[in-house]
Amino acid sequence: MSKQLNISQLVKCYGNNDPAVQGFNLAVEEGEFIVLVGPSGCGKSTILRSIAGLETITSGSISLAGKDVTHLAPAKRDIAMVFQNYALYPHMSVYENLAYGLKNRGYNKADIEQRVQQAAAMLQITDYLPRKPKALSGGQRQRVAMGRAMVREPALFLFDEPLSNLDAKLRAHMRLEIKKLQKRLGVTSIYVTHDQVEAMTLADRIVVLNGGKVEQIGTPEEIYHNPASHFVASFMGTPAMNFLPVTALGNNVVRLPNAQELHLNNVPNNEHLLIGVRPEHIDLHGHQVKVEINLTEELGASRLIHCQVGEHPLTVATNEPITKFNAIAFNQYYWFDSKTGARLGDSQFIEEEAARA
Amino acid sequence: MKKLLDHGILIAGVLFLLTPLYLLFVSSTHEVDTLIRDGLQWLPGSQGLAAYEKALNQSLGFSGEATGWRMLFNSLVMGLGFAIGKIIVSMAAAYAIVYFRLPLASFFFWAIFTTLLLPLEVRIIPSYAVVSDLGLLNSYTGLILPLIASATATFYFRQFYKTVPDELLEAALLDNTGPVRFFIDILVPLSRTMMAAIFIIMFVVGWNQYLWPLIMTTEESYTTIVMGLKNILSTVRDSHIPPYDVAFAMIILAMLPPVLVVIIFQKWFVKGLVESEK
Ligand SMILES: Nc1ncnc2c1ncn2[C@@H]1O[C@H](COP(=O)(O)OP(=O)(O)OP(=O)(O)O)[C@@H](O)[C@H]1O
Ligand SMILES: [Mg+2]
């Protein structure tokens, strides 16, 4: 196996509860940036902590750089972790924080000095080395936490929501920094977040989790353009995808929630049918689906128009200066089974065919 | 106006607490006769600090060993032994209870905790028997060791450790920190404030021990200052003149070290409170 990290059939149960993670598999290439994303409680942290060795796993195996680490102590695994609350040692200076792990591993003074200085220079925290963590801002602490992970040059970086304590602007900035740094160091990384924008921008590949199970693994493009399930489609993308329950009438005709009948492509022959349309895939000049406008949100470059199709909400994202319309068309849409949440068929571009009203 | 009232109340409180001390101090500079005839004095007398000289150097007992200096030293050993010993023992106990997956950890914790219901006075006879069987009567070890376990301090340290975020331990684990290193490098420095607080409390407790040393020691060289305070007035019977001036001086002397400890450690304590951040 040439994979850097290989996780197979990982199961983790806390006590006698239902498993928090059920049969997780993942193979990570060297230098890859993997993002685990999912709603709160879906098991992201559990997986990360299992990889770190901070949780003993119920079953399964983990190997890192060709070595089975399933039963190794955390310190023996050659990984470094950045925690959500940074977990810096409050009584040590920034320098000591960075040096502590090296000291415990028996590096000599000169070596430590050189590594710390190098990491500090890269993270631009050289000026703060003598300070205590409490004399730093959130963003600076974040960098120190990154520095503490970097100095050891581990085989794997683990990040557990490292940016969630920062304000929106700093978060966007640090996101970029992390991405740049990771590319520069080329260290394989696993990053946990529940922020799907973070996931999309950082990841080489995204793992979408739900209830301890993998929903989909894929590049950000795949996840966005080709979601494997209703859950993935609804979770990834802002504003979220619209879903309308429809009834298939045969001959590629469906009945919409507003009782309108519409001719679409490749309508699956399914009893419980859900059509998914991203807000940005809606054509305001389409004159096919009748809508009522409820509310307009101005976002500057674009605007969100919240409409209604029958009883069901539908959000439209547009950068056209249009605020009034009464019918739209779907440029691109997805079919789902509303019972199982499974994806049906392939995505299709709507053809310029007139709908039957 | 509000401020004036606040200050008025504070000043009244201070006077209420300090006046007796002032009376003691001022009276200790008078001759014994004056004290016996006229009672406590409000103005300084003619003797200066002569009573203190006597209190420190004159021996109370028969052997000549129980001088003031000696008694102060014994009390200091008791105070320091209590404070340091209790801090070490209870920190270690709390560390084991909080950080290790011991079988019956919470049982042990509650077992330690219930010893609060069994103060020395309740178990003084068995305690004495054990110490005596171990041949530790008339020794500092015997004075300190039987009382060194502290449920209160263990409880405080346990509560404190529980507030230390788990991530700190996890970060330390990833930094190749073993249990001993983690304790010394991380928990101990983080506990400084707590240690200062416990030190103050336990030093005073140790210093003020009366019943235990009274029972435990028969040799005068182990007399503590608190025992001395009692003894000095019982010498009445021999000389027929109770040496009140020396007794007063000794009371003041007995109070000084605990006050010093409180002042010194309070600074540290407050600094730790202001600075500490977990
Ligand atoms: N120590 C624990 N004991 C018992 N159950 C736990 C423990 N830690 C986590 N769990 C449970 O395991 C499940 C997964 O938790 P986990 O912390 O991995 O979620 P998460 O995806 O990281 O969520 P979040 O985004 O809120 O951090 C949750 O249902 C949680 O209640
Ligand atoms: Mg989490």
Image: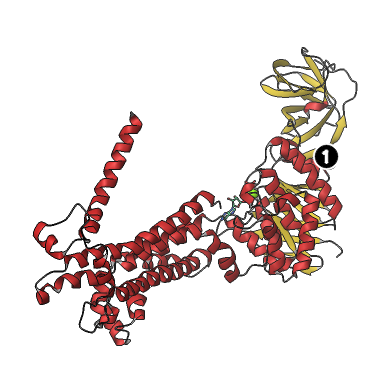
Q: Quadrant of residue B107?
A: bottom left
Front residue (pair A192, B38): B38
Residue A59 lies in what quarter of the image? bottom right
Q: Is residue A218 visible?
A: no
Indicate the position of residue B33 as horizontal and vertical percent values: 12, 64
Q: Nearer the viewer, residue B179 or A112?
A: A112
**Observer able to see residue A216:** yes
Mark count: 1
Q: Relative to B254, is B62 on the left or the right? A: left
The x and y percentages for residue B246 are 21, 67
Query: Which one is nearer the viewer's eye here, A118 or B258?
Result: B258
Which image quadrant: the N terminus of chain A?
bottom right
Judging by the rendered image, the residue that carries numbered circle 1 is A226
Q: Is residue B74 left or right of residue B104?
A: left
Q: Residues within 10 Å of mark 1 (few under 14, many from 20)?
A: some
Residue B171 in the image: above or below residue B18: below
Q: Residue at x 82, y 42 (%)?
A: A220
